[in-house]
Image (cartoon, rainbow, N blue to C red):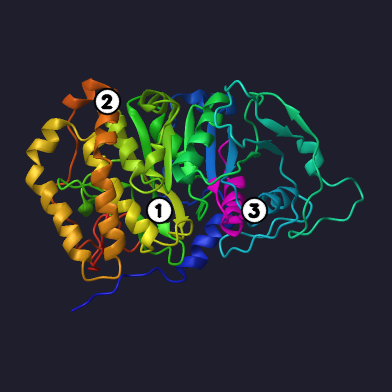
Amino acid sequence: MEVHPRRRPNARRAAGRHLRRPGRHTMTGPHRRRPPRPMASAAADHPASWPRVAVIVVNWNGWRHSIECLESLRRMTYPAFEIIVVDNGSSDGSVARIKAWARGDAAVDSPYLEVRAAGQSIALEEYDVSGVSDPLAERSPRRISPQKDLPAEGSPRRKIGEQAGSRPSARGRPPARPLSGPRVLLLKGDTNAGFTGGNNVGIRWGLERGAEFVFLINNDAIAEPDVLTKLVREALPTPQVGMVAPTVLRYADPSLVDRQGIALTKGGLPYERRSADDGPLFCPDGCAALYRRSMLLAVARDGQYFDEEFVAYIEDVDLGIRARRRGFSAALVEPAIVYHKGGASQGGPRSPRSIYLRHRNTIWLLAKDFPPKVLLRNALWILAAQIGTLAWNLATPARAAVLKGKLDGILGLRRMWRKRREDDPAGDRADLPLDRRVFLPGRRAHPWSFRAARAGRDPTVMTSRSG
Protein backbone atom coordinates (compact mmCIF):
# COMPACT_ATOMS: atom_id res chain seq x y z
CA MET A 1 0.00 0.00 0.00
CA GLU A 2 1.40 3.37 -0.96
CA VAL A 3 1.82 5.77 1.91
CA HIS A 4 1.91 9.45 1.15
CA PRO A 5 4.37 11.72 2.92
CA ARG A 6 3.23 13.56 5.95
CA ARG A 7 2.96 17.24 5.27
CA ARG A 8 2.99 20.07 7.71
CA PRO A 9 -0.22 22.12 7.44
CA ASN A 10 0.31 25.20 5.30
CA ALA A 11 3.96 24.28 4.81
CA ARG A 12 4.69 26.92 2.18
CA ARG A 13 2.96 29.62 4.22
CA ALA A 14 4.89 28.60 7.33
CA ALA A 15 8.18 28.66 5.41
CA GLY A 16 7.30 32.05 3.98
CA ARG A 17 6.58 33.46 7.43
CA HIS A 18 9.94 32.22 8.63
CA LEU A 19 11.72 33.98 5.80
CA ARG A 20 9.73 37.17 6.20
CA ARG A 21 10.48 37.40 9.90
CA PRO A 22 14.11 36.43 10.31
CA GLY A 23 15.33 35.82 13.82
CA ARG A 24 14.77 33.34 16.61
CA HIS A 25 11.38 32.84 18.22
CA THR A 26 11.62 32.97 21.97
CA MET A 27 10.06 30.36 24.20
CA THR A 28 9.44 30.37 27.92
CA GLY A 29 9.36 27.69 30.53
CA PRO A 30 11.42 24.51 30.84
CA HIS A 31 11.34 23.87 27.07
CA ARG A 32 13.05 27.11 26.15
CA ARG A 33 15.38 26.63 23.15
CA ARG A 34 19.03 26.24 24.03
CA PRO A 35 21.17 29.24 22.97
CA PRO A 36 23.28 28.76 19.81
CA ARG A 37 26.77 27.29 20.10
CA PRO A 38 29.46 30.00 19.92
CA MET A 39 31.66 29.90 16.80
CA ALA A 40 35.14 29.76 18.23
CA SER A 41 35.25 32.09 21.21
CA ALA A 42 33.21 34.63 23.08
CA ALA A 43 34.55 37.30 20.73
CA ALA A 44 32.86 35.61 17.79
CA ASP A 45 29.72 37.71 18.29
CA HIS A 46 31.64 40.80 17.17
CA PRO A 47 31.33 41.31 13.39
CA ALA A 48 35.10 41.75 13.00
CA SER A 49 35.64 38.16 14.15
CA TRP A 50 33.44 36.62 11.46
CA PRO A 51 35.39 35.43 8.40
CA ARG A 52 34.62 37.03 5.08
CA VAL A 53 32.36 35.09 2.74
CA ALA A 54 31.84 35.56 -0.99
CA VAL A 55 28.42 34.40 -2.19
CA ILE A 56 28.49 33.36 -5.86
CA VAL A 57 25.44 33.32 -8.16
CA VAL A 58 25.79 32.43 -11.86
CA ASN A 59 23.11 33.73 -14.23
CA TRP A 60 22.41 32.82 -17.83
CA ASN A 61 19.12 34.05 -19.31
CA GLY A 62 17.39 33.56 -15.98
CA TRP A 63 16.91 37.00 -14.48
CA ARG A 64 13.51 36.17 -12.93
CA HIS A 65 15.06 33.37 -10.88
CA SER A 66 18.19 35.40 -10.17
CA ILE A 67 16.55 38.48 -8.69
CA GLU A 68 14.45 36.31 -6.37
CA CYS A 69 17.62 34.52 -5.29
CA LEU A 70 19.47 37.83 -4.83
CA GLU A 71 16.63 39.31 -2.81
CA SER A 72 16.79 36.36 -0.40
CA LEU A 73 20.57 36.73 -0.13
CA ARG A 74 20.23 40.44 0.57
CA ARG A 75 18.23 39.56 3.69
CA MET A 76 20.86 37.23 5.16
CA THR A 77 21.92 38.17 8.68
CA TYR A 78 25.58 37.17 8.34
CA PRO A 79 27.65 40.31 9.03
CA ALA A 80 30.59 39.91 6.60
CA PHE A 81 29.61 38.86 3.09
CA GLU A 82 29.26 40.20 -0.41
CA ILE A 83 27.41 38.84 -3.42
CA ILE A 84 29.17 38.19 -6.72
CA VAL A 85 26.84 37.72 -9.69
CA VAL A 86 28.47 36.26 -12.81
CA ASP A 87 26.43 36.78 -15.96
CA ASN A 88 27.33 34.22 -18.63
CA GLY A 89 26.64 36.38 -21.68
CA SER A 90 22.85 36.49 -21.25
CA SER A 91 20.78 37.64 -24.23
CA ASP A 92 17.51 38.28 -22.35
CA GLY A 93 18.47 41.61 -20.78
CA SER A 94 19.48 40.00 -17.49
CA VAL A 95 22.19 42.56 -16.75
CA ALA A 96 19.79 45.50 -17.06
CA ARG A 97 17.19 43.73 -14.94
CA ILE A 98 19.65 42.82 -12.18
CA LYS A 99 20.79 46.45 -12.06
CA ALA A 100 17.15 47.53 -11.89
CA TRP A 101 16.70 45.17 -8.94
CA ALA A 102 19.70 46.76 -7.19
CA ARG A 103 18.18 50.23 -7.71
CA GLY A 104 14.91 49.02 -6.22
CA ASP A 105 13.04 49.32 -9.53
CA ALA A 106 12.38 45.60 -10.05
CA ALA A 107 9.58 43.92 -8.13
CA VAL A 108 10.36 40.40 -6.91
CA ASP A 109 7.39 38.05 -7.19
CA SER A 110 7.96 35.35 -4.58
CA PRO A 111 5.71 33.40 -2.20
CA TYR A 112 8.59 33.44 0.29
CA LEU A 113 9.62 37.11 0.32
CA GLU A 114 7.88 40.33 1.22
CA VAL A 115 8.12 43.14 -1.34
CA ARG A 116 11.01 45.49 -0.69
CA ALA A 117 10.00 49.10 -0.07
CA ALA A 118 10.33 51.30 -3.16
CA GLY A 119 13.53 53.29 -3.43
CA GLN A 120 15.67 50.98 -1.27
CA SER A 121 18.79 50.62 -3.41
CA ILE A 122 21.73 48.25 -2.97
CA ALA A 123 25.37 49.12 -3.64
CA LEU A 124 26.36 47.53 -6.95
CA GLU A 125 29.70 47.52 -8.77
CA GLU A 126 29.71 46.35 -12.38
CA TYR A 127 32.71 44.93 -14.21
CA ASP A 128 33.03 43.87 -17.82
CA VAL A 129 35.01 40.60 -17.71
CA SER A 130 34.63 39.67 -21.38
CA GLY A 131 37.70 37.60 -22.17
CA VAL A 132 39.08 38.05 -18.63
CA SER A 133 38.47 35.44 -15.94
CA ASP A 134 41.35 36.21 -13.56
CA PRO A 135 41.43 39.54 -11.68
CA LEU A 136 45.22 39.15 -11.45
CA ALA A 137 45.59 38.87 -15.22
CA GLU A 138 47.80 41.35 -17.05
CA ARG A 139 44.79 42.79 -18.83
CA SER A 140 42.60 44.42 -16.20
CA PRO A 141 38.81 44.11 -16.39
CA ARG A 142 36.83 47.15 -17.40
CA ARG A 143 35.02 48.67 -14.46
CA ILE A 144 31.72 50.42 -14.99
CA SER A 145 31.20 53.22 -12.49
CA PRO A 146 28.60 52.15 -9.90
CA GLN A 147 27.53 55.74 -9.32
CA LYS A 148 26.22 55.95 -12.88
CA ASP A 149 23.91 53.02 -12.25
CA LEU A 150 21.84 55.03 -9.77
CA PRO A 151 19.19 57.44 -11.07
CA ALA A 152 19.85 61.13 -10.57
CA GLU A 153 17.91 62.83 -7.81
CA GLY A 154 14.43 63.71 -9.00
CA SER A 155 14.70 61.70 -12.23
CA PRO A 156 11.91 59.26 -13.20
CA ARG A 157 12.52 55.65 -12.18
CA ARG A 158 13.48 53.41 -15.08
CA LYS A 159 11.27 50.39 -15.72
CA ILE A 160 12.67 46.89 -16.02
CA GLY A 161 12.46 46.61 -19.79
CA GLU A 162 14.23 49.89 -20.57
CA GLN A 163 17.87 49.79 -21.59
CA ALA A 164 20.37 51.88 -19.67
CA GLY A 165 22.40 54.46 -21.53
CA SER A 166 26.12 54.29 -22.16
CA ARG A 167 28.32 54.04 -19.09
CA PRO A 168 31.74 55.62 -18.71
CA SER A 169 34.38 53.07 -17.80
CA ALA A 170 37.60 52.94 -15.82
CA ARG A 171 40.32 50.34 -15.82
CA GLY A 172 41.91 48.74 -12.78
CA ARG A 173 41.84 45.76 -10.45
CA PRO A 174 38.77 45.29 -8.28
CA PRO A 175 39.43 47.02 -4.94
CA ALA A 176 39.88 44.70 -1.95
CA ARG A 177 37.40 46.40 0.36
CA PRO A 178 36.27 45.11 3.76
CA LEU A 179 32.99 43.28 3.39
CA SER A 180 30.26 45.05 5.31
CA GLY A 181 26.60 45.05 4.38
CA PRO A 182 25.02 43.64 1.23
CA ARG A 183 27.32 44.77 -1.59
CA VAL A 184 26.88 43.25 -5.04
CA LEU A 185 29.52 42.76 -7.72
CA LEU A 186 28.08 42.17 -11.19
CA LEU A 187 30.62 40.51 -13.51
CA LYS A 188 29.42 40.73 -17.09
CA GLY A 189 30.84 38.17 -19.54
CA ASP A 190 30.26 37.82 -23.26
CA THR A 191 30.00 34.01 -23.55
CA ASN A 192 28.25 31.18 -21.74
CA ALA A 193 31.06 29.58 -19.73
CA GLY A 194 28.69 27.04 -18.15
CA PHE A 195 28.13 26.36 -14.48
CA THR A 196 31.79 25.47 -13.95
CA GLY A 197 33.31 28.39 -15.84
CA GLY A 198 30.97 30.96 -14.34
CA ASN A 199 31.57 29.77 -10.79
CA ASN A 200 35.33 29.67 -11.37
CA VAL A 201 35.23 33.35 -12.32
CA GLY A 202 33.23 34.20 -9.20
CA ILE A 203 35.46 32.11 -6.91
CA ARG A 204 38.63 33.75 -8.24
CA TRP A 205 37.20 37.21 -7.66
CA GLY A 206 35.96 36.29 -4.19
CA LEU A 207 39.31 34.86 -3.07
CA GLU A 208 41.17 37.85 -4.51
CA ARG A 209 38.98 40.16 -2.42
CA GLY A 210 39.91 38.30 0.76
CA ALA A 211 37.08 35.80 1.29
CA GLU A 212 37.85 32.97 3.73
CA PHE A 213 34.80 31.00 2.59
CA VAL A 214 32.88 30.82 -0.66
CA PHE A 215 29.17 30.01 -0.72
CA LEU A 216 27.77 28.82 -4.05
CA ILE A 217 24.03 28.90 -4.64
CA ASN A 218 22.07 28.22 -7.82
CA ASN A 219 20.16 31.18 -9.21
CA ASP A 220 16.93 29.12 -9.00
CA ALA A 221 17.29 28.72 -5.22
CA ILE A 222 16.58 31.00 -2.28
CA ALA A 223 18.16 30.97 1.17
CA GLU A 224 16.81 31.52 4.64
CA PRO A 225 18.32 34.54 6.42
CA ASP A 226 20.48 32.53 8.85
CA VAL A 227 21.80 29.89 6.44
CA LEU A 228 25.27 31.42 6.06
CA THR A 229 25.71 31.89 9.80
CA LYS A 230 24.88 28.25 10.49
CA LEU A 231 27.18 26.92 7.77
CA VAL A 232 30.17 29.02 8.85
CA ARG A 233 29.61 28.08 12.50
CA GLU A 234 29.96 24.43 11.55
CA ALA A 235 33.10 24.85 9.44
CA LEU A 236 35.06 27.41 11.43
CA PRO A 237 36.33 25.36 14.41
CA THR A 238 37.64 22.45 12.27
CA PRO A 239 40.17 23.31 9.53
CA GLN A 240 39.81 19.83 7.99
CA VAL A 241 36.16 20.54 7.12
CA GLY A 242 36.56 21.99 3.65
CA MET A 243 32.97 21.50 2.42
CA VAL A 244 29.64 22.09 4.17
CA ALA A 245 26.18 21.19 2.85
CA PRO A 246 22.84 22.69 3.94
CA THR A 247 19.45 21.00 3.79
CA VAL A 248 17.79 21.82 0.47
CA LEU A 249 13.99 21.68 0.44
CA ARG A 250 11.74 21.67 -2.59
CA TYR A 251 10.64 25.17 -3.52
CA ALA A 252 7.22 24.01 -4.72
CA ASP A 253 6.67 21.85 -1.62
CA PRO A 254 8.94 22.76 1.30
CA SER A 255 7.57 19.89 3.38
CA LEU A 256 9.82 17.56 1.34
CA VAL A 257 13.61 17.28 1.33
CA ASP A 258 15.16 17.83 -2.08
CA ARG A 259 18.73 16.95 -1.08
CA GLN A 260 21.19 16.88 1.80
CA GLY A 261 24.45 16.73 -0.09
CA ILE A 262 25.63 13.85 -2.28
CA ALA A 263 26.24 10.16 -1.64
CA LEU A 264 28.61 8.16 -3.86
CA THR A 265 28.01 4.42 -4.36
CA LYS A 266 30.59 1.71 -4.89
CA GLY A 267 29.40 1.62 -8.50
CA GLY A 268 30.72 5.14 -8.97
CA LEU A 269 27.24 6.69 -9.24
CA PRO A 270 26.54 9.92 -7.31
CA TYR A 271 23.08 10.38 -5.81
CA GLU A 272 21.41 13.34 -4.18
CA ARG A 273 20.97 12.34 -0.53
CA ARG A 274 17.54 12.84 0.95
CA SER A 275 18.29 11.23 4.30
CA ALA A 276 20.89 9.21 6.16
CA ASP A 277 19.33 6.11 4.54
CA ASP A 278 20.92 7.21 1.26
CA GLY A 279 24.43 6.57 2.54
CA PRO A 280 27.20 8.66 4.09
CA LEU A 281 27.65 12.26 3.04
CA PHE A 282 30.38 12.47 0.43
CA CYS A 283 30.30 16.15 -0.52
CA PRO A 284 27.85 19.05 -0.88
CA ASP A 285 25.67 19.41 -3.94
CA GLY A 286 26.67 22.32 -6.17
CA CYS A 287 23.14 23.70 -5.82
CA ALA A 288 24.18 25.13 -2.44
CA ALA A 289 27.60 24.58 -0.88
CA LEU A 290 30.07 26.32 1.41
CA TYR A 291 33.76 25.84 0.55
CA ARG A 292 36.81 26.79 2.61
CA ARG A 293 39.46 28.99 1.02
CA SER A 294 42.36 26.64 1.88
CA MET A 295 40.55 23.71 0.26
CA LEU A 296 39.86 25.64 -2.95
CA LEU A 297 43.49 26.74 -3.21
CA ALA A 298 44.63 23.15 -2.62
CA VAL A 299 42.53 21.69 -5.46
CA ALA A 300 43.08 24.49 -8.01
CA ARG A 301 44.74 23.50 -11.29
CA ASP A 302 45.61 26.12 -13.91
CA GLY A 303 43.35 28.64 -12.22
CA GLN A 304 40.37 26.27 -12.20
CA TYR A 305 38.56 25.03 -9.11
CA PHE A 306 35.74 23.24 -10.93
CA ASP A 307 36.92 21.36 -14.01
CA GLU A 308 35.51 23.45 -16.85
CA GLU A 309 35.45 20.46 -19.22
CA PHE A 310 32.60 19.07 -17.12
CA VAL A 311 30.48 22.19 -17.94
CA ALA A 312 27.73 21.17 -15.45
CA TYR A 313 26.66 18.09 -13.45
CA ILE A 314 29.05 15.86 -11.47
CA GLU A 315 31.51 18.79 -11.27
CA ASP A 316 30.71 19.06 -7.54
CA VAL A 317 31.62 15.39 -7.03
CA ASP A 318 34.85 15.86 -9.00
CA LEU A 319 35.75 18.75 -6.69
CA GLY A 320 34.72 16.71 -3.65
CA ILE A 321 36.97 13.77 -4.55
CA ARG A 322 39.94 16.05 -5.19
CA ALA A 323 39.33 17.69 -1.82
CA ARG A 324 39.14 14.32 -0.04
CA ARG A 325 42.33 13.17 -1.77
CA ARG A 326 43.99 16.12 -0.02
CA GLY A 327 42.65 15.28 3.43
CA PHE A 328 39.56 17.50 3.62
CA SER A 329 36.17 16.25 4.80
CA ALA A 330 32.53 17.29 4.38
CA ALA A 331 29.84 18.19 6.92
CA LEU A 332 26.06 18.58 6.84
CA VAL A 333 24.15 21.29 8.72
CA GLU A 334 20.53 20.15 8.77
CA PRO A 335 19.01 23.36 10.22
CA ALA A 336 20.55 25.50 7.44
CA ILE A 337 17.76 25.72 4.86
CA VAL A 338 17.74 26.49 1.13
CA TYR A 339 14.72 26.15 -1.19
CA HIS A 340 15.41 24.91 -4.73
CA LYS A 341 13.25 24.92 -7.86
CA GLY A 342 15.51 22.55 -9.80
CA GLY A 343 16.74 22.34 -13.39
CA ALA A 344 15.99 25.94 -14.37
CA SER A 345 19.37 26.57 -15.98
CA GLN A 346 19.81 23.33 -17.99
CA GLY A 347 16.23 22.69 -19.09
CA GLY A 348 15.41 20.30 -16.26
CA PRO A 349 17.03 17.06 -15.05
CA ARG A 350 15.44 15.01 -17.87
CA SER A 351 16.42 17.31 -20.74
CA PRO A 352 18.71 15.72 -23.38
CA ARG A 353 21.48 18.16 -22.49
CA SER A 354 21.36 17.29 -18.78
CA ILE A 355 21.23 13.53 -19.44
CA TYR A 356 24.17 13.73 -21.84
CA LEU A 357 26.34 15.67 -19.39
CA ARG A 358 25.57 13.35 -16.46
CA HIS A 359 26.44 10.16 -18.33
CA ARG A 360 29.59 11.59 -19.91
CA ASN A 361 30.87 13.18 -16.71
CA THR A 362 30.30 10.05 -14.61
CA ILE A 363 32.77 8.15 -16.81
CA TRP A 364 35.25 11.01 -16.66
CA LEU A 365 34.92 11.08 -12.88
CA LEU A 366 36.05 7.46 -12.58
CA ALA A 367 39.10 7.93 -14.79
CA LYS A 368 40.16 11.27 -13.40
CA ASP A 369 39.60 11.00 -9.66
CA PHE A 370 39.09 7.50 -8.24
CA PRO A 371 42.22 6.21 -6.45
CA PRO A 372 43.56 2.99 -8.08
CA LYS A 373 42.79 0.79 -5.08
CA VAL A 374 39.18 2.01 -5.06
CA LEU A 375 38.85 1.31 -8.79
CA LEU A 376 40.29 -2.20 -8.44
CA ARG A 377 38.22 -3.08 -5.38
CA ASN A 378 34.98 -1.99 -7.07
CA ALA A 379 35.75 -2.73 -10.73
CA LEU A 380 32.89 -5.22 -11.19
CA TRP A 381 30.39 -2.92 -9.48
CA ILE A 382 31.50 0.05 -11.58
CA LEU A 383 31.09 -1.96 -14.78
CA ALA A 384 27.66 -3.15 -13.64
CA ALA A 385 26.61 0.43 -12.90
CA GLN A 386 27.61 1.67 -16.35
CA ILE A 387 25.90 -1.23 -18.13
CA GLY A 388 22.84 -0.92 -15.90
CA THR A 389 22.33 2.81 -16.52
CA LEU A 390 22.72 2.20 -20.26
CA ALA A 391 20.24 -0.69 -20.33
CA TRP A 392 17.77 1.21 -18.16
CA ASN A 393 17.54 4.02 -20.72
CA LEU A 394 17.63 2.07 -24.01
CA ALA A 395 13.84 1.84 -24.18
CA THR A 396 13.29 5.50 -23.23
CA PRO A 397 13.37 8.73 -25.27
CA ALA A 398 16.65 9.52 -23.49
CA ARG A 399 18.58 6.72 -25.22
CA ALA A 400 20.25 8.98 -27.80
CA ALA A 401 21.55 11.36 -25.14
CA VAL A 402 22.69 8.43 -22.98
CA LEU A 403 24.54 6.72 -25.83
CA LYS A 404 26.25 9.94 -26.90
CA GLY A 405 27.21 10.69 -23.31
CA LYS A 406 28.73 7.23 -22.79
CA LEU A 407 30.59 7.41 -26.11
CA ASP A 408 32.01 10.88 -25.50
CA GLY A 409 32.95 9.82 -21.99
CA ILE A 410 35.01 6.92 -23.38
CA LEU A 411 36.57 9.12 -26.07
CA GLY A 412 37.68 11.59 -23.39
CA LEU A 413 39.35 9.00 -21.15
CA ARG A 414 42.84 9.80 -22.41
CA ARG A 415 42.48 13.48 -21.46
CA MET A 416 41.15 12.54 -18.04
CA TRP A 417 44.03 10.14 -17.42
CA ARG A 418 46.43 12.97 -18.33
CA LYS A 419 44.75 15.22 -15.79
CA ARG A 420 44.99 12.43 -13.24
CA ARG A 421 48.77 12.20 -13.71
CA GLU A 422 49.06 15.96 -13.21
CA ASP A 423 47.15 15.76 -9.92
CA ASP A 424 48.71 15.21 -6.50
CA PRO A 425 50.02 11.59 -6.60
CA ALA A 426 49.71 11.28 -2.82
CA GLY A 427 45.95 11.28 -3.30
CA ASP A 428 46.13 7.88 -4.98
CA ARG A 429 46.61 6.36 -1.52
CA ALA A 430 43.39 7.92 -0.22
CA ASP A 431 40.21 5.98 0.40
CA LEU A 432 36.71 7.22 -0.33
CA PRO A 433 33.60 6.87 1.90
CA LEU A 434 31.39 5.02 -0.60
CA ASP A 435 27.93 3.67 0.03
CA ARG A 436 27.89 -0.14 -0.06
CA ARG A 437 25.19 -0.24 -2.75
CA VAL A 438 25.65 0.05 -6.52
CA PHE A 439 22.30 1.78 -7.18
CA LEU A 440 19.86 3.62 -4.97
CA PRO A 441 16.68 2.98 -6.98
CA GLY A 442 14.21 2.91 -4.09
CA ARG A 443 15.08 5.97 -2.05
CA ARG A 444 12.49 7.67 0.07
CA ALA A 445 11.15 11.19 -0.37
CA HIS A 446 11.09 12.40 3.19
CA PRO A 447 8.68 14.83 4.84
CA TRP A 448 10.70 17.64 6.33
CA SER A 449 11.48 17.51 10.00
CA PHE A 450 14.78 16.74 11.66
CA ARG A 451 13.50 13.27 12.52
CA ALA A 452 11.68 12.59 9.26
CA ALA A 453 14.64 13.80 7.23
CA ARG A 454 16.51 10.81 8.64
CA ALA A 455 13.75 8.20 8.42
CA GLY A 456 10.99 8.76 5.86
CA ARG A 457 8.38 6.17 5.04
CA ASP A 458 7.26 6.92 1.52
CA PRO A 459 8.83 4.92 -1.31
CA THR A 460 9.22 6.73 -4.62
CA VAL A 461 11.35 5.61 -7.53
CA MET A 462 14.29 7.97 -7.94
CA THR A 463 17.15 7.97 -10.43
CA SER A 464 20.80 8.74 -9.95
CA ARG A 465 22.50 11.92 -11.10
CA SER A 466 23.83 9.86 -13.99
CA GLY A 467 20.64 8.18 -15.08
* Crowd tier of the residue under label 2, counting other residues whose Cα lies within 10 Å: few below 14, some 14–19, many 20 or above: some
**Tag 2–tag 1 contact (CB < 8 Å):** no
Magenta-tinted stretch: 58-79
Q: Is residue 401 left or right of residue 96?
A: left
Mark 3–mark 2 distance (CA, rounded to whole Å): 40 Å
Expressed as whole percent of the image width and height from the top left, the position of residue 49 reads 54, 24
Amino acid type, mark 1: Val
Q: Earlier in the sequence, mark 2 or mark 1?
A: 1
Residue 36: tell me if it is visible: no
Q: Residue at x 14, y 31 (%)?
A: 372
Location of the N terminus by quadrant is: bottom left
Q: Is residue 49 above or below residue 219?
A: above
Q: Which residue is mark 2?
A: 327
Q: Is residue 30 left or right of residue 279?
A: right
Q: Secondary structure at mark 3?
A: helix
Q: Which residue is mark 1?
A: 248
Say which mark, if any, is on residue 94: 3
Expressed as whole percent of the image width and height from the top left, the position of residue 374 reads 13, 35
User: Does the magenta run of residues contain 306?
Assistant: no
Residue 325: tell me if it is visible: yes
Q: Earlier in the sequence, mark 3 or mark 1?
A: 3
